[in-house]
Amino acid sequence: MSVTPPAAHPTQLSAPAFRGRIGRDARSGHYAVPRRYRLHLSPATAPGLRIAVTHGLLGLDAACPVTLLPEVPDCPDGGHSALRPLYDASAHRYTGAALGPVLSDDWSGRIVSTHAPDITRDLARGFGGGRPALYPYGGDSEIQAVERLCAEGIEEAAQRAGAPDTEPAERAAALEKLLTTLDTLDRSLTGYSYLIGDQITAADIALWVALVELDTVHRHHLDATAVHRIADHPALWAYARRLAARPAFGAHLDLDGIARRHQAQCRGLEAAGSAVQILDWAAHAAGRGDTPPQVNRP
């Protein structure tokens, strides 16, 4: 089945909307079969890191192989030459950039999805039997609320707060929105290990990836005072440290790749906050960070 997405602009930052889904039976067209599907991603991007952590937690190396993409795309339009055959096979006369992440169908040689939230859900629900319940029954609304909070209150707010072509009042408002979001999350995590219930869920993956991006990317465009205010959320950053020490999280943390991607693609100005690192991610990913004990939610 071929899908024709809207034409992509060379400067777009995300892949076009291939939104095929892996269902639970043959009637869905794409159904869960081990080694039928393949992931193409770079953990140096936020969507790629989110999928890689999900894949690692579910232990899907055998069921769904991963092909790693370079952190800096090798095409002038910002796409990956390795993905071009999949895009050509999946979209009629598609001339846009061949962007990741991609979930492809090895049986047809076509793209199933480029939408990271759908991909993580389908991996967990299609192949997650007997594995951690990253999308627990009844938890969808809470997980989606956290995903929106991360997208709007952390990622978008941090980007606007550090944008040099934005009016000072708008930057200040965006910073306050970011800090309010962090305040809310810090209070929610005080005394608890996870955001929802007593085990890791997709909400924790989304938040952890947003915090990685905040400290390794967005921090470079904020002033030092703003970064110190961001760092002043002890429960939140202790939570980020604990998750980084878990192999499924820390093993996929490509700090050098994130730095290379940021340097290659960012056109903003570096600010004083660049010198104020919040966490030593490499140390925590290697298990050398402090991991204070936490209690679970009742």
Image (spheres, rainbow, N blue to C red):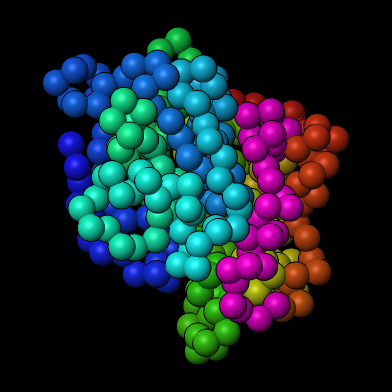
| For residue 271, above or below residue 97 | below
| For residue 252, above or below residue 36 | below
User: Which quadrant of the view contains residue 108?
Assistant: top left
Q: Is residue 121 visible?
A: yes
Q: Percent from the top left, x then y, of residue 127?
A: 40, 19
Nearest the viewer among 148 and 124 is: 124
Q: Percent from the top left, x then y, of residue 5?
A: 23, 55
Q: Percent from the top left, x then y, of residue 202?
A: 46, 35
Give the main secondary structure of the magenta stretch.
helix
User: Which quadrant of the view contains residue 297?
Assistant: top right
| For residue 78, above or below residue 292 | below
254 part of magenta stretch: yes
Nearest the viewer among 213 and 112 is: 112
Q: Residue at x 33, y 31 (%)?
A: 105
Q: Residue at x 69, y 46 (%)?
A: 254
The answer to whether 92 appears left or right of 173 in the picture is left
The answer to whether 265 appears left or right of 40 in the picture is right
Nearest the viewer among 203 and 101 is: 101
Q: Residue at x 69, y 36 (%)?
A: 250
Residue furthest out toward the top: 130
Q: Residue at x 31, y 25 (%)?
A: 107
Give the magenta range.
242-270
Nearest the viewer among 115 and 209 is: 115
Residue furthest out toward the right: 288
Q: How many marks?
A: 0
Residue furthest out toward the left: 27
Q: Percent from the top left, x then y, of residue 267?
A: 59, 77
The N terminus, quarter of image: top left
Q: Is residue 211 visible?
A: no
202 part of magenta stretch: no
